[in-house]
Image: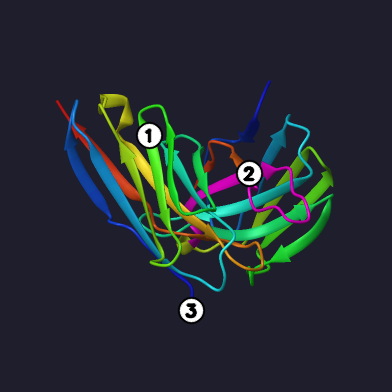
Amino acid sequence: GQNIDQPTEMTATEGAIVQINCTYQTSGFNGLFWYQQHAGEAPTFLSYNVLDGLEEKGRFSSFLSRSKGYSYLLLKELQMKDSASYLCAVMDSNYQLIWGAGTKLIIKP
Amino acid sequence: ETGVTQTPRHLVMGMTNKKSLKCEQHLGHNAMYWYKQSAKKPLELMFVYNFKEQTENNSVPSRFSPECPNSSHLFLHLHTLQPEDSALYLCASSQAGESSGANVLTFGAGSRLTVL
């Protein structure tokens, strides 16, 4: 079966760096997405990786290794507003999105 | 209004009630989706409409009935629901293409449904 694994919850300190991992086993691969979802709000698109390597976008970076079935989202200079759930999703060979259960990130002062 | 708008934001209903969830997108997208989000579970795709034609129905019980009258509006009609149907129902839209690798979804804020 198809599966996406990511930690259920993580805690980090304001101003620090945190890395949220995502591992996947899917039928084919057509890209990996990260979304951010604040409590009670809509998930919003953060990043899309289809080639190996690191994509940097401001304080957020996303890394992909297709051979390892692995991605991470790196958040730098953490702010209280970064407290949210982070959803990892992989598009399989049929262009279907397979979702992880999300990682709840708690930022402490 | 911009983006994807869902109404109502909160809904409480009994198992014998009939209600509808509404979604509207103002982005000119050609595909719309209904997802179910339960606590600590992955998003579950329920229905997909591509160019107003339903293209996906992931074994969803018949007590959920979608309707897509045009490319901007999507409804989810609910009747005789069960308590386990209590969840956040998210609508999304995208501009789908043939090789839509980067098919980015724009989500609404969701309708929180509680079935008593």
Residue behind mark 1: A60
Label 3 – label 1 distance at C-alpha: 31 Å
Of labels 3 and 1, earlier in sequence is 3
Residue behind mark 3: A1
Q: Give, as a single range, the part of the protein colored magenta.
A: B85-103
Residue located at (43% from left, 52% from top): A88
In the rendering, at what x and y percent does residue B90 appear?
Answer: 56, 46
Q: From the viewer's perspective, is the residue at label 3 or at label 1 nearer? A: 1
Residue located at (40% from left, 27% from top): A58
Q: Amino acid at mark 2?
A: Ala
Residue behind mark 2: B92
Q: Tell me, yes or no, whether the two marked residues, 3 and 2, touch with CB atoms within 8 Å.
A: no
Residue B98, magenta (yes or no): yes
In the rendering, at what x and y percent does residue A55 appear?
Answer: 45, 40
Front residue of B51/B21: it is: B51
Above-or-below relation of B30 to B60: above
Q: Tell me, yes or no, whether the two marked residues, 2 and 1, touch with CB atoms within 8 Å.
A: no
